Image: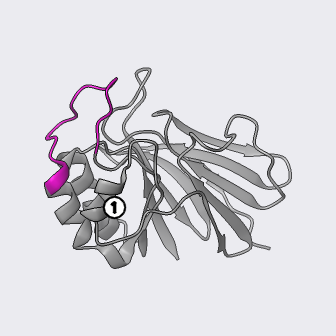
Amino acid sequence: MKYIIGSDIHGSLYYGLRLIELLEQEQADKLIILGDLYYHGPRNPFPKEYNPAKLAESLNQIKNKLIVIKGNCDSEVDEMISDFGFLPTHTMPFFNYNLILTHGHNYEVLNPKLNSGDILLYGHYHLPVLRTLENDKIIASPGSVSLPKNDSKRAYIILSENAIILKELDNGKIIQKESLCLN
């Protein structure tokens, strides 16, 4: 099982299509989007190729390969144009790990209460993060694929049974890699 994880597309057709390309290039089984798919938000500039309707059409074409978490900028109207569901904070197994998927605005990501083997994946803050804590706990965020903050890189995460890898969206360069312990 292999996942591509992105977040905070904010209506950018250009960067949304890039995530879809990566799904095939990285030979991943699923694309997890950690919220804020279509709307750019009142504090943000318009991202490159802002076109939420076309982005929705493109994502609808791969709906069976998507896991989507609802972000603070996602609305009922967004759900109406999407052929897939938006989940609230969601927990699911991944080998002997427990994935916690959230947007970040409704979950304590700075000081989370995690159990051994938990991997917290979040969006919202537009900053890429990959931290391993004691007892095999991991906290990770791909940042924003379209509107990174604080001079950070546009990034995405690859999660496989062997590793969690934070990569630059534009060139695929590895930012950081952590091995996973599956025993």
Is 43 one of the magenta-colored residues?
yes
Residue 180 falls in image quadrant: bottom right
The residue nearer to you, when weighing 172 against 122, is 122
How many labels, in total?
1
**Residue at the image point whose x is 18% and y is 47% from the top:** 14
Left or right: residue 32 compared with residue 89: left
Would you say the magenta stretch is mainly helix, strand or loop? Answer: loop
Q: Residue 9, position in %: x, y? A: 32, 45
Q: Which residue is mark 1?
A: 79
Q: Magenta region: which residues?
A: 39-53
Along the viewing direction, whichever of 164 and 85 lies nearer the viewer: 85
Label 1 residue SS: helix
Residue at image coords 30%, 38% = 146
10 on left or right of 138 = left
Magenta highlight on residue 8: no
The C terminus lies in which quarter of the figure? bottom right
Quadrant housing residue 92: bottom right
Q: Residues within 10 Å of mark 1 (few under 14, many from 20)?
A: some
- Which of the colour schemes (rainbow, by chain, secondary structure, one colour) is used? one colour
Q: Could you tell me residue 29's position as x and y percent?
A: 42, 76
Three-letter code for the amino acid on which mark 1 is drawn? Glu
